[in-house]
Amino acid sequence: AQKITQTQPGMFVQEKEAVTLDCTYDTSDPSYGLFWYKQPSSGEMIFLIYQGSYDQQNATEGRYSLNFQKARKSANLVISASQLGDSAMYFCAMRESAGRRALTFGSGTRLQVQP
Amino acid sequence: GAGVSQSPSNKVTEKGKDVELRCDPISGHTALYWYRQRLGQGLEFLIYFQGNSAPDKSGLPSDRFSAERTGESVSTLTIQRTQQEDSAVYLCASSLGTIGEQFFGPGTRLTVL
């Protein structure tokens, strides 16, 4: 079974609008972390935001916020006031506390911001 | 620079040849990870080093792949007898211990002809 599922291969959003990128995950580990990374066309992986499974509040970092719904096992990324520079691939990833310490990535969502 | 660096940035090789990819982690980062990203896909974990512990090699796709790391410094990923299916971007990341955020290098784009 997929551990990280991103069901939106591509998304369009108008500049200055908000957009939500979906991510669901599957784990039986009670302690885990969820990450979002941005990958522009240049190929670098840029860390955006982190949510721990025991965090009481949704994580926020500037224009990025994470809509964490633990019971539904979803960790959607919300980008507010989209900018042209937000056009990129976005990857959701999970790290479980048990076993492998590396990140498990989803297949990504390509976001295109239109002027 | 203070970030993770990788070399070469691009490598073109012929099928059957061996290649070595290098990663210089951020100074002081004890954990180092190698990932592979095929065109249009997400990242696949390959191998993970943490301090002096035995590496987690569970993601290596075949015995043609191996990696070494000396202490908490440079790591080398070696692919022997390369195949066309090995063509991908190979990304290295490092972190402070196993809890911290992973910082990624720019990657090495490997093309096997």
Image: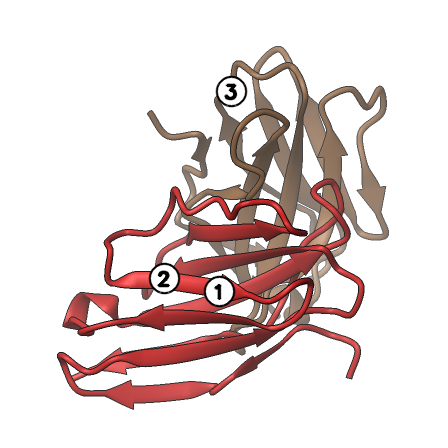
Chain colours: A brown, B red
Residue at 65%, 42% (x, y): give it.
A35
Is label 3 in a helix, a strand or a loop? loop
Q: Is residue A85 visible?
A: yes
Is B91 placed above or below B62 here?
A: below
Tell me the quarter of the image containing the N terminus of chain B.
Answer: bottom right
Are the residues flagged by discs 1 and 2 in contact, CB closer than 8 Å?
yes
Q: Nearer the viewer, residue B84 or A80?
A: B84
Q: Whole-percent x and y of residue B107?
A: 50, 74
Q: Mark 3 points at which residue?
A: A27
Residue at 58%, 71% (x, y): give it.
A44
Question: The numbered mark 3 sits on a residue in which chain?
Answer: A
Q: Name the residue under label 2.
A: B66
Q: Whole-percent x and y of residue A109?
A: 47, 51
The amino acid sitting under disc 3 is Thr
Horizontal side of residue B35 vs B87, given as left or right? right
Q: Mark 1 points at which residue?
A: B68
Q: How crowded is mark 3: few (under 14 residues within 10 Å), some or many (20 or more)?
A: some
Is A43 placed above or below A39 here?
A: below
Q: Whole-percent x and y of residue B19?
A: 32, 80
Is label 1 in a helix, a strand or a loop? strand
Residue at 74%, 69% (x, y): give it.
B26
The amino acid sitting under disc 2 is Ser
Q: Whole-percent x and y of residue A86?
A: 65, 64
